[in-house]
Structures are given as C-alpha cells and as structure tokens.
Image (cartoon, coloured by chain):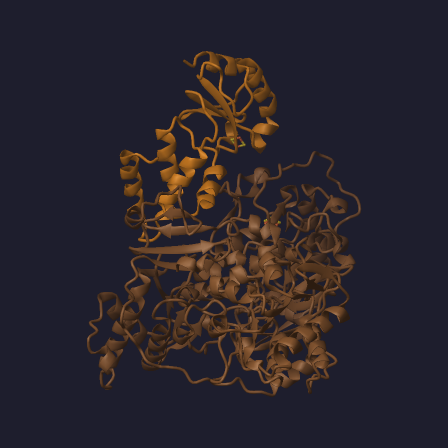
Chain colours: A brown, B orange
Amino acid sequence: MLEIEIDGQLVNAEPGEMVIAVTDREGISVPRFCYHKKLSISASCRMCLVDVEGAPKPQPACSTPVADGMKIHTQNDKAKASQKAVMEFLLINHPLDCPICDQGGECELQDVAVDYGSDVSRFSEGKRIIAPSDIGPLIQTDMTRCIHCTRCVRFGSEIAGIMEMGGTGRGEDLKIEPFLKEGITSELSGNMIDVCPVGALTSKPFRYELRSWQMNSINSIARHDLVGSNLYAQTYKGNVKRLASGDNDAVNETWISDRDRFSYEGLTHDNRLLAPQIKVAGQWKEVEWDVALDFAVKGLKNNILNSRNVQKLGGLASATATTEELHLLQKLLREMGCENLDYRLNIKDLDNAIHLQSNIKLADLEHIDQAIVIGSNIRLEQPMINHRLRKAQLAGAGITTLNVKEFDFNYKTNDIIVAPNEIANTLAGVLRVLVEKSAEEVPAYLLAVTPCAQAIDIASSLLNSDKTVLILGEHVVNNAQAASIANLITEIAKLSNSLTLNLTVTANALGAQRVNFVPNSTGMNVNEMLAAEMRAFVLLDVYPEYDFHHLDEALNTLLNNDVFVISLNGFKNDLVAQYSDVMLPMAAMYETSGTHVNINHEMQSFSAAVGAPGESKPAWKILKVLADLLELPGFHYENSTQVLSEVAHQMTPVHEYDTAINLDKSTVEVETIWTHSPYHTDALLRHATSLRASKIGQINTASINAATAKSLSLSDSDTYLGVPVDITETMADQCVFISSNQATNTGAL
Amino acid sequence: MISDNAKKQIDSWIEKYPEGKQSSAVMEALKIIQKENNNQLTHDSIQAVADYLDMPGIAAAEVATFYENYNHQPVGKHIIRFCHNISCMLNGADDLISHLETKLGVKTGEVTDDGLISVKKVECLGACVGAPMFQIGDQYYENLTIDKIDKIVDGLK
Ligand code: SF4
Ligand code: FES
Ligand code: FES
C-alpha cells in the first residue's frame, strides 16, 4: 500500500494503480474521455492532465502510475490551464450541435466543456464534416461529433471480440468507422452507445425521442436469459424509452447484450393485449375485469370444482414469468388440490429430461483453465456468459466445444464436430478414461466403450487443468439421450473435479424450479396433460407455436370445446385466441415488480419501471384476485414483496431423478436440432422491431452439409421444415441444425 | 484475389516475424497487392490482405489509409506526390498545387484523361530544406517554381 497526496489530501493507493483510479475512488473529479475502467488505456485524449510535483510537464492521470509520496494537483493553475487547452483543441472540430444532439444532457463532452471550455471559440476556420454512415438498425452515427477517443474501437477489439470500428485516415482526416459494409454486427454492439462519451454513437430506436433529464431512471433486471443483467430502465410518461447498462461485477460487469438493451421496443407494439376478453358463443367480447374474472371462476367451477375432478385441471407457464407469478400460480393450483403443473413446455420427452446442477458463479467463469462446451452456440445464445468465457480464454484457458456445427466464436476454441447421437458416446469415452485413471471400478455401462482420440484429449485436458467447467447447452435439450448426457456430465464432473453450468434452461427457469413449478409423483407433467382428457387449463404467458414441443397435441387438447382455458398473456396471439375462453392481459417485462433467479442462484428483485398498458395488470395481482374469488386461503398479499418472502423461506425442492446412463444410439436417419434464433426466444423479443431487423435478428437458417443436402435433395434455394437451407461444410453428416425466427415446426422432429 | 506470386512474396515477409505475428507484414502485403492491381487498393483487396494475415479488415484499412503511399483511387502512370506539410506550405505549396491542377485539368486525387499523370497531396517527405517539393517515382524535385513544374511535367511521358 502506497501513500500519495492529491490536492493536499493524503490517500492510499495500490502499487501499479493509475492516478485516475485513485481519484475516482476518492471522489475527486478528473475530466476524461478516452479512459474507461473496463478498457485498455490509450491516453490519447489528454483531457485528464494533472500536475505532478517534480514532473516538468502535466501528466495524464489515466496512464500515470502512482508512486509512493507522489504529490498531485488536479485543480491548480498548471492543471487547469492544461485541461482548458486540451478542451479548446477538442472543440475545434466539434460541431457544437448540442441542441439537436441526442446525447445532450448526458454528454461527457458537454459536461466537461461547461467546466473547462471557454465561452467563445477562437477558431474561426471551417470545421470538418463527416458524412453519416448507416451501421445497422441499432446504432445511430453522427461522426462529425466524434472526438476520436477510440473507446468504441477498443470496446470492439477487447470486449466484443471483433474489431468492427477503427480509425481510418490520418491527421484531420482521421475518421472512426466500420470497414464492413454490413455495419456493426456484434451481439454486444449497443454498449458502444454507453461508452461513447459524445453523441457520435447513440441509440437509433431512441433517436430524437427525449432528453435524458425528462426521463426517470429505474434499476431493473433483464430477464431474457439466465444472467439477469442489471440495467436502468429509462421511462417517460409511463413508457420505457431506453435501457442502459447497470454496474454489477458479479453479474454483467458494466455491459449488457443487445438482446437486453433493445427488447423494450416490443412493449409498445400494436400487438399488445390490452383488455380482458371473454368468449361468448364463439365470439370474443371485451369486458371489465370483474366480468372476466367472474367468467373465469365460473368456468373453473363448472368444469372442475363442482364436479370435484381437479385432476382434470392443468396449469402451464412459460419460464419468462417472474418467480412471484410462478409461485402464485402453483399455490393457486395446489390449494385447489391440483398437482398438474409444468413450465417445461419445450421438452419432447420428460422421462428424458436433463437434470444438471449449475454450480459455478458467473464471475468465476473467467478464472477457469479449461471449459468443455457441449451443444451450444454460446456466443449468440448466452452473450454475457460467453463474454466471461472469452475473458478466460484470453487469459490462457482452453475452450473445447462439442457441437453439431462449427460456430463463429470470438475467441480461440478447439471445435469438435459431433452428430447429436455421438455426444453421449464421446462423453462416455471421456468418463471411461477418467474412471480408469482413478482407482474406481469400471461400471457395466462403460465396459463396451472405447474412448475415441477426442475423448482421450478432453479427459486429459480436464485432468491437466486446475479449474474446469462443463457447460451443457440448449441444443441437447431434446437429444434422444439428453438425460444420459446430463448424467454423464455429472459423473465426469465428479471424477475430474469440474464445476458444471446448465444452459439447457433459460430466462427464469431457475425461479420456476425454486417454486417447484413441476408436478410431484401424483400429478401430470405437460406432456401427460396434453395426452389426457382435461377439462380446464390456466396458462401463464404461453405462446403455443413457439413454446410447445408437441404443438399438435397441445392444440388438439386445448382446442377441444369441452376444455375451459384461461390465458394470461401480454401479447395477442391467434392460437391463444382460438383455444382460450378468457384472455387476461398481463404486464410484460419492466411493467411488473418481481424477482428473477439467475445462474448464480441469486434472487434479483426489481420494481415495475412503468405501469402496465391499457387494462392489463401484473400477473401476480391477477392470480391473487382469481384465488380470492375462488375463496382459496392464504392470498392476502398487498405487494409482490410479500409473495417473495414466502418463496424466500422455502427451500428449492430436490427431485429424485433417474441417474441411469443409456448409451444406445438413436437411429434416426436425419437428426434435426431446432432452436429459436437468438432474438426470438420470448414474446417481447419477437415484437422488438429494431432487434429483429438486425443481422442476428434475421438469422433463419437450416444448416446442412452438402452430402446430407444431396441425400435429402435439397439445395441452397430450398427450405427444410419451412426454414431456408444453408449449405455449410463444417457440420456433422446426416444432421440439420436450425436456428429459426419462425414458429416451431416440430411436427417432423 | 491474391495471386500465387503475391502470396509467395507476402509469405517471405511473414517469415521475418515471430510466429503468430503475421499481421506485422501488413504494410508490405498491401504494397505487393497494390502493385499487382494497377497501383491501387480496393475495399476487397484490403479485406483479402486482412484475411490472408488473419487480422480484422478494419485493422488493415487503418494502415492502408494512414500512409500516403497506398492509393485508394485509380492513379496515372506517374504520380506526383506534392508535399503540403508545414515547410512546403509556408513556401507556397498551396499556390503551386493549384497551378498544377489547372495545368493538368484535374483535382488532387484525380488522373488526367490520358491516364498519364495523377496528383496527390502528401505529408512531409523529409526534404524541408528544399521546400516546396514533390516526388515522382523515386525522384525528389525541390525548390519548385511554376516554371520548374511546367518543365518537369511537360517532360513526363
Ligand atoms: S465514436 Fe464515440 S466512442 Fe468512438 S471514437 Fe468517436 S467519440 Fe470515441
Ligand atoms: S483520459 Fe487520460 S488521456 Fe484520455
Ligand atoms: S514539409 Fe514538405 S518536405 Fe517537409
């Protein structure tokens, strides 16, 4: 620990720290543009000049390491004069168009200019102008305002992992621009808006909307994935106008994915369900809430309660719901004596469901030495988790992927291409090597396994590394050997001392697990319900054509005239309208208070940033009133915090599951993996216009290799299961990998 | 995009750098490609160099646009590189450049219709003692005047 003096005040500093880190910690303000705590130091703007006693010239605080006894002045005449001089230079070519600039009011240049700029410019020559360039639907550029701090450039090469922006030209012709004609494509690109200190890079969907001081800023949590990134919802007159990243080193550091940043646009989509509706004689009718709820209660009584056949009632929810909503729905069902409930709508065969713990903390991911990623395009599917993995790789970790197809990672990976029906065998090979190395006896199911070269490599990479993690991704969800693969991973983790990360579930699935939103042995799971003769359903935020694996069965059951269906939805949906009897409009993300359980098993609560639009209401309130009307006990909640405290006192239930490992290969001729493309994973995203227009939002491909395409008589201009075919050589034989922005077409899967 | 011959030449430059530092050869690689393509670099040829050296396209473009010896527009058989940096500017380079432009009927950056001559403004060529000056090919021409320029330019074929 060193002691230095800043503006006459003695402060402590760590050796190697830069002066600016110390002043920031001590709350002493030093102006800066190019410095950013999460980016490398470029020391190019010179705005942070301070006077260091003994140094002949002023020193940049961002790149001057502290030394014991150093005396620094940030405010004396020498420092001030240098800062003012730099400011004058920076403003020479700046257009000073603050009145029409979206950054106005939250602009670092504007703020610093107020403190250090002069009132009148001495520069009377012409200023340079840079023609605007279109870099995609998410980021607006006004490069005449750019001060060449290179934060966006460094963000690209250091954090996003693809250098997309760069400085071309020289001297006064220097321009910050992307080289690629398609503009900026990174899944983290929106962070450039946050790092740009001026109005050169601003949010395109937010362009010319509002001034920052007109908006309220509310802490919130993004719920599109397992991370639960911390962010600010900026609102105006009851609408979310923009989202900006928040700081939380244990979760998202200071970055958020584009998926989290731009999804809010869906909130104001025309397709929102805004009023309660009931179906009378096949006709939808908008009604008051009390009428709709009475209708719902009557329907439940007529179909279920009066005839005491509560086993014919089912509750299904999507994992995008909040923990409180899921808790209330399960409580409502269970209070009626109904044990038929589930959130695992996308699972083909629940006897083959994956049971795998996640026991690594997000922040620890960047300290691992070796990761094995199985069945995941982790970069696009879980951008923030991938970001941690990338950091680990840059620090020297080995990342091996086992995928059906080679994906484009933004760091070095060792890619092993395996057909889905080979994953279990490959992992069994790994396990066999590990078992043999340990003193344990080889279990019967491994006796016939001969480890392949890759399995041997993986096993030795696990044994030779200190901190290892096994990551299971969503492509394995409906693998014919899914359960065995998960069990193999558990075994491998035990023997290799690895941690595990289960990415086969997403959004708030851990919240659903926490409140036990699955049936016990007396109830039916989703697939059993869909096959049974049911009389009523309560559906929470379900969009059938995207959510159900067994869509045909689901529609068969739900469309049956004898089945009374109560649907809570945020968005209108044709199929929902066809099978429901009551539609209750519910608040969407940022419109309700609640809790998301993230991959660290942390309960992150948030309040509503805006009110729910139209007549819609937070689902926890709807469920509470429904329970009251059904005269069920224990629903006297006044706010969602009371609901949560009930959850917090319960333990996450542990379910028994089959740990057997079965290595019999499936013999399907062509194996198809269906995934929702990254910006189509939930209803809000599917309504977020700008995101959908972005390059990643446009992904809709069925990847097949040439040989397989030939055997299926497919060419590049055909579709497979309705999805455009993309012929690529780097993928397994006799397989199709689909990443689609269309409704799931699982009939053929 | 990159001919075998060019690849061979680039490879010999890559060899001079430690393994994994192949992108250090970017300047030479750009030069080689430029020479093969009518003395001009295009978006695609810069991308091709970047791909060959396994570096981001924009990083190669940064280099290609920083140095004056890379051409991004069609150029003539002879390129007059006119210095317009401080010493030359103080000694009247700007007027001489306008004279040259009127004489040839082109603006800086353009080529004469017969494809013979193009004019480019460049930064200090290290010949400030002889300012104002320009360079054609490997030759420096110093202490330029209007008469001198006319004579030099008329002699170009
Ligand atoms: S665009 Fe913004 S972040 Fe990028 S260099 Fe210019 S001022 Fe800096
Ligand atoms: S912040 Fe220190 S030089 Fe830019
Ligand atoms: S300024 Fe022209 S040669 Fe130096």
Up the image or down, B28 lies above or below A416; here it is above
Q: Position of residue A146 (x, y in %)?
A: 63, 46
Of residues B65 and A643, the one nearer the viewer is A643
Q: What residue appears at the point 71 percent right and 66 percent down from the top-left corner?
A: A609
In the rendered structure, the answer to whether residue B68 lies left or right of residue A291 reads: left
Q: Quadrant of the N terminus of chain A?
A: bottom right
Up the image or down, B156 lies above or below A458; here it is above
Quadrant of residue A633 within the rendered picture: bottom right
Q: Is residue A74 visible?
A: no
Of residues A589 and A230, the one nearer the viewer is A589
Q: Position of residue A124 (x, y in %)?
A: 74, 36
Q: What residue appears at the point 29 percent right and 38 percent down from the top-left corner?
A: B7
Quadrant of residue A572 within the rendered picture: bottom right
In the rendered structure, the answer to whether residue A308 lies left or right of residue A379 reads: right
Q: Is residue A569 visible?
A: yes
Q: Position of residue A691 (x, y in %)?
A: 58, 52
Q: Quadrant of the C terminus of chain A?
A: bottom left
Q: Position of residue A373 (x, y in %)?
A: 38, 67
Of residues A695 and A150, the one nearer the viewer is A695
Of residues A390 and A640, the one nearer the viewer is A640
User: Total number of numbered labels?
Assistant: 0
In the rendered structure, the answer to whether residue A536 lies left or right of residue A411 reads: right
Q: What residue appears at the point 48 percent right and 65 percent down from the top-left corner?
A: A553
Up the image or down, A12 lies above or below B74; here it is below
In the rendered structure, the answer to whether residue A699 lies left or right of residue A75 reads: left
Up the image or down, A562 lies above or below A206; here it is below
